[in-house]
Image (tube, helix red, strand yellow):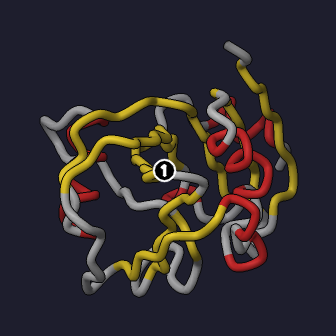
């Protein structure tokens, strides 16, 4: 399967969210403790529930996963993920960043948050595609990307567009 074929077969992707808190040269990453993406560093987020907007889902997931109330979200990207033999994993992830929240990040049953300097992001302990787009988020650029993963969760094919403001 090619990326072009995967896109053609999946016109409506399940929506999910990712949110990254940013402060003074640092980004908040969280170690996933269970479920999809377990043992990988990522942002916080998850599935959009019925009747919920994507932005509401990002705020809810952040509150549930790290105990922080986000006041303002900045949409920075759209990631479209396709998996060769796991089509139930296919999803469109709306990516946000925020510098405006209340509370201190706390560990939950699902996530263990940690502040990381921009130049120390542990890309080797994250999803492989993160190294393609996370630097753009850190730099404040917007992006749109499409990734096709193989059975080992490795990127087989990708397309990416960076939007310069």
Q: Is residue 29 above or below residue 141?
A: below
The residue located at (48%, 60%) in the rendering is 43
Residue 159: x and y in percent read 82, 35
Q: Give coordinates of residue 115: x percent, y percent.
A: 50, 70
**In the image, what residue occupies the spot 36% across and 57% down?**
46
Q: Nearer the viewer, residue 85 or 124?
A: 124
Where is residue 30 drawn, in percent x and y? 46, 73
**Extreme top residue here?**
165
Q: In front here: 31 or 3? A: 31
| Horizontal relation, residue 136 to residue 97: left or right | right
Image spot of residue 59 (x, y percent): 24, 47
Q: Quadrant of residue 96?
A: top left
Q: Quadrant of residue 106?
A: bottom left
In the image, farthest residue toward the front: 24
Vertical placement of residue 105 versus 109, above or below = above
- Give the quarter of the figure containing the C terminus: top right
Q: Nearer the viewer, residue 133 or 7?
A: 133
Determine which quarter of the picture holds residue 68.
bottom left
Q: Secondary structure at mark 1?
A: strand
Q: Is residue 155 above or below residue 74?
A: below
Find disc 1 in the rendering and name its residue: 22
């Amino acid at each position: 399967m090619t990326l072009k074929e995967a896109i053609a077969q999946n016109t409506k992707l399940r929506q999910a969210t990712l949110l990254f808190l940013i402060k003074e040269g640092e980004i908040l990453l969280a170690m996933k403790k269970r479920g999809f993406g377990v043992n990988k560093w990522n942002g916080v987020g998850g599935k959009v529930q019925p009747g919920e907007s994507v932005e509401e889902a990002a705020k809810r997931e952040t509150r549930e996963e790290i105990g922080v109330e986000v006041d303002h979200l900045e949409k920075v990207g759209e990631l479209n993920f396709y998996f060769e033999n796991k089509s139930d994993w296919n999803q469109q992830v709306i990516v946000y960043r925020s510098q405006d929240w209340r509370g201190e990040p706390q560990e939950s049953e699902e996530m263990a948050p940690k502040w990381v300097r921009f130049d120390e992001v542990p890309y080797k302990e994250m999803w492989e595609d993160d190294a393609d787009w996370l630097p753009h988020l850190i730099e404040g650029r917007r992006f749109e990307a499409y990734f096709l993963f193989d059975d080992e969760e490795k990127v087989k094919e990708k397309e990416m567009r960076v939007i310069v403001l």
